[in-house]
Image (cartoon, rainbow, N blue to C red):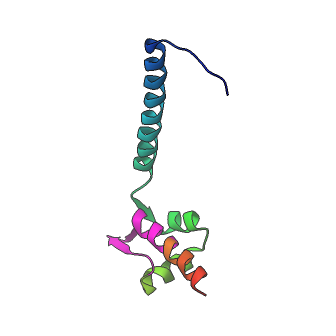
Amino acid sequence: MKLVVTTQEMLESLIDSSVSKAVNNIYSKKENEKERKKFYTIKEASKELSVSILTIRNYIDKGILDGKKFGKRVLITNESIEKSLQEVKSLRYKR
């Protein structure tokens, strides 16, 4: 075990820099989450989930994904996609 002797100012600056770094990491993660899209088209959702467009349409018809119609376009919320992924994971482990 190594004993390090520092002054109060050095210790305060070390703690301050560590806390600043941690706070900046938290804020940057929150900003990245905000940058994610809130709504996906069927084509974008199919790329996000790595399935075909027809599969996305079937998921909407079955109620697995929540699709909202805006004119001719169908938009899917980010929360709906994340929720469907969590349900699929939980079904896999229930077997």
Give the quadrant of residue 67.
Answer: bottom left
57, above or below 24, in the image:
below
Front residue of 27/39: it is 27
**Foreground residue, 20 or 33?**
20
> In the visual, does 46 lie left or right of 37?
right
**Residue range highlighted in magenta:** 64-85
Snapshot quadrant of residue 9 = top left
Quadrant where the N terminus sits is top right
* Camera-nearest residue between 26 and 52: 26
Check the picture and name the quadrant holding the C terminus.
Answer: bottom right
Asked whether the viewer can see residue 77, the reply is: no
41 to 36, vertically: above or below: below
Closer-to-camera residue (2/95): 2
Residue at point 44%, 62% (across, down):
40
Magenta span includes 8: no
**Residue at 40% in and 65% down:** 79
Q: Residue furthest right?
A: 1
Residue found 55% across the figure and 63% down from its top: 48
User: Image quarter for residue 24?
Assistant: top left
Q: Residue at horizontal 66%, vertical 23%?
A: 2
Q: Position of residue 21 (x, y in %)?
A: 48, 30
| Image position, residue 17 (x, y; %) | 47, 24
Residue 11 pos. (x, y %) = 47, 19
How far across and down, in percent of the image, does residue 29 sit? 46, 44
Q: Report whether residue 90 is seen.
A: yes
